[in-house]
């Protein structure tokens, strides 16, 4: 499918500086879909770093150590925004020449020129902390400033975190949900007659999010697969993720479980998506691009009815939503997801049998009903090609936002 570009336009292209969380840090790979497919009439200028976060990212390394030290992690959340923005200001680089607008990746901007900001939730603005008392007034002042042109949460629930945690009176009209999007894939889906392939994708970086394999539902997938493997012949489970060593030994006992825990060229990773039949993502925290990637490769998705997942997966149409397990403190009292906190990491050590049963039940439906499996996959792919999560739909919104933000 063709995605519009600016090559045939005579008008001048406006330049947007895509500013990462801190100068010199790599941009998350999700921004590749922004830089490669900008709205008509715009181009993004970056520092050339649009790859996944480095394993040496200091905040993730510090978080991992502080969580193990217990209460120190909780204390650090109070002061984290000050450290973060002090470092950000100290490292701030001069802007490239002839920039029309700054696009901030989840932080406030102190420059006196037009800027917009996208965010997963309000915690993004305070370096993914939970405490706003020491920085709340600064956030409200900067978001209300005439230089801030738009605040773009990725989801409706992300927008709710802004309304629940800040006094938005001075900038509520600037808040507009702009969902993430991925480009459509040009391929013909081919189905194997010999096996049904289940795919789980986590992260290849053990430092990216502490205990990410468990947080993304890897243990739930393994327990469910053991039941499914007893019911059906010719199943295969592919796990593309960092896997803790003790769990990897368990996987090695099954000849039809394949673990890919190394970095792959995209051409090889893409083959795993293309040849899969069902995508499993029973995670305990906010959805990422991986669900959209799976949909773009014509895969029905089974995920938890949690946070923003219901905004992505249309239950029984593009996949299945399974119940979130009880007893896990997913959110703080002000709607912030508590992924990676001591409470959540402790709670998910024991996998809820109900979650496993539901995953087995929904996966079984798709295994047994080839027609439904293919229909859901077609529906999912259509959402990426022309629907809510298409580049076309996203760029229509962004073009209007950028046009308004750069008006003379």
Image (tube, rainbow, N blue to C red):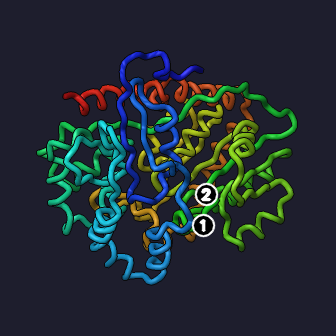
Q: Quadrant of the C terminus?
A: top left
- Residue 168 location, x and y as percent? 16, 47
Read off the residue under disc 1: 206
User: Which one is in front, 209 or 335?
Assistant: 209
Q: Is residue 80 visible?
A: yes
Locate residue 317 relative to residue 145 in the image: left or right.
Answer: right
Locate residue 103 relative to residue 56 in the image: left or right.
Answer: left
Locate residue 167 relative to residue 327 in the image: left or right.
Answer: left
Q: Which mark is residue 120?
A: none
Q: Residue at x 15, y 47 (%)?
A: 144
- Residue 212 location, x and y as percent? 56, 63
Q: For residue 393, which quarter of the picture?
A: top left
Vertical relation: 266 (above or below) 218? above
- Residue 42 location, x and y as percent? 39, 29
Read off the residue under disc 2: 203
Residue contact between numbered discs 1 and 2, judged by CB atoms under 8 Å: yes
- Residue 317 location, x and y as percent? 55, 30
């Amino acid at each position: 499918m063709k995605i519009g570009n600016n090559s045939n336009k005579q008008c001048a292209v406006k330049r947007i500086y895509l500013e990462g969380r801190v100068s010199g840090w790599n941009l998350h790979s999700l921004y590749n879909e922004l830089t490669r497919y900008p709205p008509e009439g715009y181009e993004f200028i970056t520092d050339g770093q649009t790859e996944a976060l480095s394993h040496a990212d200091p905040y993730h390394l510090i978080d991992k150590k502080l969580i193990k030290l217990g209460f120190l992690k909780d204390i650090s959340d109070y002061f984290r925004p000050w450290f973060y923005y002090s470092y950000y200001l100290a490292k701030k680089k001069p802007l490239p020449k002839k920039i029309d607008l700054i696009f901030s990746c989840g932080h406030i901007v102190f420059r006196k020129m037009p800027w917009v900001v996208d965010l997963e939730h309000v915690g993004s603005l305070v370096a993914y902390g939970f405490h706003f008392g020491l920085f709340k007034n600064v956030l409200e002042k900067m978001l209300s400033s005439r230089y801030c042109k738009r605040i773009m949460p990725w989801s409706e629930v992300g927008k709710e975190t802004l309304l629940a945690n800040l006094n938005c009176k001075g900038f509520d009209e600037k808040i507009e949900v702009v969902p993430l999007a991925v480009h459509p894939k040009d391929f013909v889906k081919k189905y194997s007659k010999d096996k049904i392939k289940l795919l789980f994708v986590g992260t290849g970086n053990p430092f990216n999010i502490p205990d990410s394999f468990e947080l993304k539902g890897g243990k739930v997938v393994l327990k469910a697969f053991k039941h499914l493997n007893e019911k059906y012949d010719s199943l295969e489970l592919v796990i593309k993720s960092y896997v803790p060593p003790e769990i990897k030994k368990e996987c090695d006992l099954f000849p039809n479980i394949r673990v890919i825990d190394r970095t792959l060229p995209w051409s090889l990773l893409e083959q795993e998506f293309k040849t899969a039949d069902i995508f499993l993502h029973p995670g305990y925290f906010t959805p990422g691009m991986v669900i959209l990637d799976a949909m773009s490769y014509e895969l029905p998705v089974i995920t938890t009815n949690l946070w923003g997942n219901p905004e992505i997966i249309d239950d029984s149409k593009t996949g299945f939503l399974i119940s979130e397990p009880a007893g896990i403190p997913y959110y703080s009292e002000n709607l912030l997801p508590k992924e990676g906190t001591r409470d959540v990491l402790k709670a998910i050590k024991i996998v809820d049998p109900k979650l496993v049963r539901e995953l087995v039940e929904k996966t079984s439906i798709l295994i047994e009903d080839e027609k439904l499996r293919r229909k859901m996959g077609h529906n999912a792919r259509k959402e990426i090609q022309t629907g809510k999560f298409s580049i076309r739909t996203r760029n229509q919104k962004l073009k209007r936002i950028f046009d308004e933000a750069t008006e003379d």
